[in-house]
Amino acid sequence: MRTEIARPIRLTDYKAPDFRVSDTKLVFDLHPTETKVTATLTLERIGAAEAPLVLLGERLKLLGVSLDGRALETSDYEVTPETLTIGDVPDRFTLDIAVQINPQDNKTLEGLYMSSGRYCTQCEAEGFRKIVYFPDRPDVLSKFTVTVRAPKAGFPYLLSNGNLIDAGEDGDAHYAIWEDPFFKPSYLFALVAGELDVLEDAFTTASGRKVDLKIYVDTGMRERAAYAMDALKRSMRWDEEVYGLEYDLDLFMIVAVRDFNFGAMENKGLNIFNASLLLADPDTVTDLDYERIESVIAHEYFHNWSGNRVTCRDWFQLCLKEGLTVFRDQGFSADMRGDAVQRIKDVKALRARQFPEDAGPLAHPVRPSSYLKIDNFYTATIYEKGAEIVGMLKTYVGPEVYRKALDHYFQTNDGTAATLEDFLKSFEAVTGEDFAPWLKWYVQAGTPHLSITPSYDAETQRLTLALAQVTHPTPAQANKHPVPIPVRLGLLSEDGAPLTFTIDGETVSDTLFVLREAEAELVLEDVAVAPVVSALRRFSAPVKLTLTELDAHKFARFRGDADPFNRWEAAQSLAKDLILSATGTAAAYAEALRATLADDTLDDAFKALIIGLPTEPDLAQILTPVDPAYIHARRSAFKAELSNALFDDIEALYERFEDERLEAQAPFSPDAKSAGRRALRNALLDLMMASHIDADDARREKLNWRAQYHYQLSHNMTDLMAGLNAVAQLHGEDYDGTLEHFYDMFKTEPLVLDKWFAAQAMCANPETLNRVRRLTQHPDFDARVPNRWRAVVQAFAANNPSVFHDVSGQGYDFIADQILLVDKFNPMTAARLVEVFGGFKRYAEPHASLMKAALERILATPDLSKNVSELAGKALA
Ligand code: 0A1
Ligand code: ZN
């Protein structure tokens, strides 16, 4: 039995709002269990003359409503669990609404809630309706003035969006009045009140406006906000230089909170961050955390234009702001850390999360056509595939025209709620071309398969490439159409040197071809020798490529493709083939890797990436039916073989780094080059550890010693975690003692304890199944804190495939239990885990049946939330 009857929201049902809310005045009297919120709305009819006023509200206790100062009788309006409707209203009027809410008991972390004794809000996508009745939809833009009142004791800071225009005292209480001069939808509203430390700085914009920057954190954590502040200033400068976009208020604030469902939120002038994506110092976070903090700070800041100044007409257009903003933050990170390495990491993430989503029952277009809960659509498809589409448009039109199109987009849509059509219209305006074919990328789900078959004629020196695309059916979309696929390609000779060719009368070694139809032929002239084809360079389109080529050609690209992305890609592709073919040996692969590691022209971060073999989930995507135990065994064996073949080289390289590290003892720096060195050294350690399989006693002892040494001599969290993971990989006598040592060192640091929990949950030893159960009983475990819950439960389900997919089905049972547990109080976070069961039909037995049974059990549970029932239902369909 399901309690909530689900009615899907459809894009085709979109109707413009009937009322404009030109002005919104809010007054908050904060109280943990009885907060009073009053809203004074200035309304004007813009729709049908007879249309009633329908406001949205959930879990609100209505205290009173007045229209133009006259208190309404209960017979004047109708209240349902989701709406407040006033049937008879004039064309222009003022409405006063008073409600009472309970932030302390709000564990959904949506609307107004309490975290570490502070009040904070999360309103995207539909959280504002848990604060007060309002037309809570992104196309109603209003000017907000907010009064926040709270006791002075315990709540010295009272923050909201915009500029502080007044503050004062009122007995034991005090208040602050904030005014945001920019019209905004309710999802960008924010409020924070409580005890905080603040790190202050300033930024002068290109046009000379001085902006005060304030980052608020837990008391005692101010120093740990310094890196985020630096990243913020770099982001502000970058957006001016690269997109010509300046910040528009005199104040920009960020607040870090511990309890947060997602990563961070771009509320106007008052970003709210999950503390795990803001606080940083060398002793408590890794290089990867520094990298994420930098990119999320940029992402939220960039939303000020792509999201806030130009927002979305409806939630179906979510990727208008998210895809574009991810593309912008990826560009920023590439400029900070190197394009090739950044591109590889972005594609890895796309393939790890978006490709499986697009290939399974939860596949949906970047612009979906219906949903039950929009929270379920903050997906890799909307974010990452959305970013890829913007990237393809840029590749297609070139950087200068792209910038013109974006200028046009921001200028013509500023202050409005726009659609994807508006975005494409800007490309049409600056090129005069029809961009309608590109809309297919937004409305069609599924990853296109691209095949390229080259044939070379030595006599005519002509290379003919036959290209074809096909997209397989996805749920509710049986028929697919071709999409425009930009294919960047180049040629090299078998010894790795770039090879020129003639196309359109020009001699080049690299070209861009756009495949628009299902099939096409591309002819390259003057190709002097039988070439190696390097196609889809820099991953020029988010497709699955099958290139007909010899292994020798892949090795040539592994050793020397001029496109670093394809160099990495060739290595990955070879490794996948070798691992999955039961007879593949690592010998030739090891030789190519040895040459790569010795290549001084490559940077350390790139080498670290190329050492990393395809992950088990990567391999699961290409093996049908998926056999997790086989994948785990084959990958471990291949990695061990590689490790043995290269052991002396990797050990020597590792030691060279170690000597340098000990000699220099330079203070830690999170910059890209230093991080790259640490990444390479830690990747070498990881590869060395793989040789423990079938190792003799001497080797085993050496590895134990190395892992311990690495752990104990580390001076920063990056190296410490690498050491801990090495110890975990060996899973020997030292494991428990090392974990205990780590715990004792960091038991008062919640963000580091999250790492301690996650490291255990991700350990590939079969013993982990019992361990994760024990961890949920640990005194420091709390399922109500999403960061901690995800550190154990999500880390296990998403990053420990061989144990999660244990043939007993116990891993599935554990995760199903956890989803049901958390669904009782935080449906949004619980639902995000359902995707780990998504691809069950692709799995071998007994996995498929056991995963299906877990989903069925979830779906049959009484009182399931809309969030979980939507995703579990779709996963089973
Ligand atoms: N707009 C944010 C993502 C976000 C969405 C929902 C949230 O709570 C339910 C929180 C954040 C971003 O893209 O960063
Ligand atoms: Zn975003």
Image (cartoon, rainbow, N blue to C red):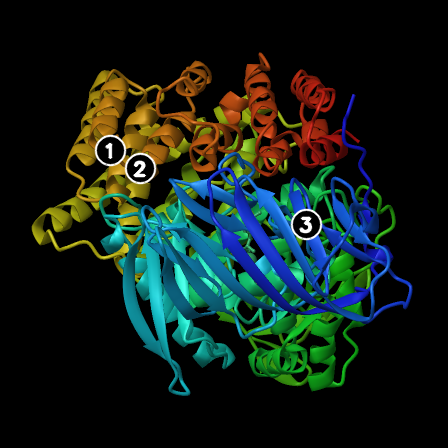
Point 28% across, 18% down: residue? 732
Q: Nearer the viewer, residue 546 or 153?
A: 153
Residue 152, given in percent of the width and then of the height, sits at 34, 51
Tell us which disc is closer to us: 2 or 3.
3
Residue 133, given in percent of the width and then of the height, sits at 68, 52
- As drawn, which residue projects farthest toward the top? 808
* Corner quadrant of residue 108: top right
Rounded to the nearest angstrom, the CA distance separating label 1 from label 2 is: 6 Å
Residue topped by disc 2: 752
Q: Seen in the image, is 574 located left or right of residue 751?
A: right
On residue 746, which mark appears? 1
Q: Seen in the image, is 834 located left or right of residue 420?
A: left
Query: Which one is earlier in the sequence, the residue at label 3 or at label 1?
Result: 3
Amino acid under disc 1: Phe
Q: Seen in the image, is 481 located left or right of residue 219?
A: right
Q: Are marks 1 and 2 in contact (CB under 8 Å)?
A: yes
Up the image or down, 290 lies above or below 310; here it is: above
Query: Which one is earlier in the sequence, the residue at label 1 or at label 2?
Result: 1
Point 31% across, 73% down: residue? 202
Query: Which one is earlier in the sequence, the residue at label 2 or at label 3?
Result: 3
Q: Is residue 727 visible?
A: yes
Amino acid under disc 3: Gly
Which element is circle 3 on? Answer: strand
Local crowd at mark 2 within 10 Å, few (<14), some, or many (≥20)? many
Q: Nearer the viewer, residue 368 or 514?
A: 368
Residue topped by disc 3: 64
